[in-house]
Amino acid sequence: MKCKSLLCGCIGPLLFFFFIPAGTSSLRAASDTPKLNVLVIFAHPDEGEIYAGGISAIYSKLGERVKFLSLTNGDAGHWSMDPVALAKRRYKEAMEAKKILGLTEYEVLDYHDGKLKNTTEIQEIVADRIEKWSADIVLLFYPIVTVPGGHNDNMQAGLIVRDAAKILKMEKSPAFLYMRDYFTTSFSHVPDVAFNIEDVWETKLLAMKAHESQVVESNPHADGILDEVLKSEAKRTEYLFYNSYPYSRITPDIKLAITKWYGQKKAEEIRWAEAFEFAEFGLQINDNAIAELFPMLPKTYILKGSASWLDTGIDLKSGQEIEIRAEGEIVWKKEGYNFCGPDGNVPYTRWGKRPVLACGVGALIGRIGQSSDYTFMIGRNLTIEACAEGRLFIGINDDNTSDNAGFYNVWIQNINMKKP
């Protein structure tokens, strides 16, 4: 059970803690900075939902502007329906998914399903859409010429976006991220970034369920179980799950990225995620861009055992809640090779002049502001509510850090403001 501590008062450097329920996580309040413009480009209506429905729902919840752009109308995605009628039906399904995900826009171009070509015409259309959206982030299919058994439209879609990027007339290029589709996800690769979509997993499923022409009819028909699916609501629910989870489950390659961004312990708890690779063109993503473009990711820090205090760059407001998690090991006394983790040496003693006497030597501790009035124990995992405004610092609970070694990996997520 995860607990939350309320920073509400202290005697000297020691704070009293009271436990209250935890909230949901994000790194950035939507009102603090200009909105991000996210554009997801794919070949057929329903593919944005399949491959990026989770991250799109998260961006929408954060107040960012998210647009889906399907390059074809999906008019060949059914074994029996007339193409014109099917295109209209799939558009309606897309509009329903738009509501579920909270998208700002969902545009479906009128190119025919199965016949997409990487022409100058469509490159210019896509470039125009990227520019008009003032896109900060563009998600696209991995561009590849041929994949055994691959879908022509999906391969062409990746190539179209890549070539459209070359003719953009934008002051600042978007960051382009590859999303692996059904045909390329099995190729060996290690994603650069992965996102925990546990909180929006049900939303993603509902958005995919909106495309009934596919998940209730066309796909079950192709699998030879159409009658079985049509007769049973339970079977439809089961089929939706098994038609969806391969694109959100934690594979070994995604596990590496999840562990990098959330830590090993948290990575073991996460069941559903979406992962992407940074494209070699467009805005090249550095640490500053990570924080700006992906506010839902925890901020990551390496705190050396020899450090006194590390400035996190996070300015807290009174009532603001943050979650801090840490892993690693330090040597807090080289002469005796005394090791400890973020919880510090156990049992602790009261000797010395450590910043927080009521926790062990070497523990991960925090401080709000420059003074020692708001200094507190963090340990391996703590969710806190700040009772003061000021910069957040993290440090090692030791009166002499100069003889220490090792480091802690620290992840910090902003939660929310306390409701009145």
Image (cartoon, helix red, strand yellow):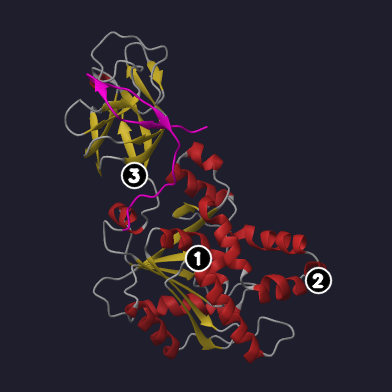
| N-terminal-most mark, 2 or 3 | 2
Residue 405 image position (x, y, % from top left): 32, 24
For disc 1, the marked residue is 101
For disc 3, the marked residue is 420
Residue at 44 percent of width and 54 percent of height: 193
Residue 64 image position (x, y, % from top left): 37, 64
| N-terminal-most mark, 1 or 2 | 1
Residue with the most extreme left position: 370
Residue 52 image position (x, y, % from top left): 51, 64
For disc 2, the marked residue is 224
Q: Name the amino acid, label 3.
A: Pro
User: Gap in Å between the C-alphas at discs 2 and 3?
Assistant: 55 Å
CB of mark 3 within 8 Å of CB of mark 1? no
Residue with the most extreme front position: 420
Corner quadrant of residue 341: top left
Q: Is residue 229 visible?
A: yes
**Does residue 92 belong to the magenta stretch?**
no
Boundaries of the magenta span: 1-30
